[in-house]
Image (tube, rainbow, N blue to C red):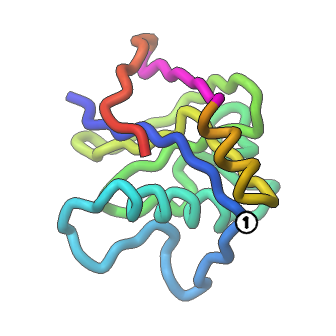
């Protein structure tokens, strides 16, 4: 069984990760609010250097980098279609962006989110979108 939350998100600027804290780590194991999980995903995606960043990864070789213990983050892309092969621990909830962008102006985010569309397949099966953040 797969538990998944899909994100549609836009950040006005890339966030800097706290080097002392594991990216995406959370202090409690209570269910995260959609806005909190989106913030965690952005922090995770921005925490890694370009050469090994899961968002830059074309194959899936870096998909396990800095994964938190309570959820598995799939990376987005820089606008292209990506096919990655990743092994996810059994029973781990999955969070994946269908669309994502970093924009310099808030208005650009609003336009992007209004017009954005995305889809994903997991093990060859198209995912329904259980939640849009």
Q: Is residue 72 left or right of residue 33?
A: right
In this picture, which residue range is highlighted in magenta?
A: 115-123
The residue at 66%/71% (across/down) is: 15
Q: Position of residue 47 (x, y in %)?
A: 65, 67
Q: Position of residue 5 (x, y in %)?
A: 36, 40
The vertical placement of 118 against 101, above or below, is above
Q: Quadrant of residue 95?
A: top left
The vertical placement of 90 against 127, above or below, is below
The vertical placement of 112 against 31, above or below, is above
Q: Quadrant of residue 88?
A: top left
Please name the predominant secondary structure of the magenta segment in the image: loop
Q: Which residue does the numbered mark 1 point to in the structure image?
A: 13
The residue at 73%/33% (across/down) is: 58
Residue 118 part of the magenta segment: yes
The residue at 47%/18% (across/down) is: 121
- The one of 86 and 4 positioned closer to us in this rendering: 4
The vertical placement of 8 against 43, above or below, is above
Q: Is residue 58 left or right of residue 100?
A: right
């Amino acid at each position: 069984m797969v538990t998944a939350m899909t994100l549609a998100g836009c950040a006005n600027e890339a966030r800097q990760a706290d080097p002392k804290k594991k990216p995406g780590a959370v202090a409690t194991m209570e269910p995260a609010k959609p806005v909190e999980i989106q913030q965690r995903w952005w922090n995770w995606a921005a925490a890694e250097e370009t050469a090994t960043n899961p968002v830059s990864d074309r194959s899936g070789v870096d998909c396990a980098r800095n994964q938190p213990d309570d959820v598995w983050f799939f990376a987005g892309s820089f606008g292209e279609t990506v096919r990655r092969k990743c092994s996810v621990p059994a029973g781990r909830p999955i969070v994946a962006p269908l669309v994502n962008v970093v924009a310099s102006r808030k208005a650009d985010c609003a336009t992007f989110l209004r017009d954005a569309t995305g889809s994903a397949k997991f093990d060859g099966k198209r995912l329904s979108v259980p939640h849009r953040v």
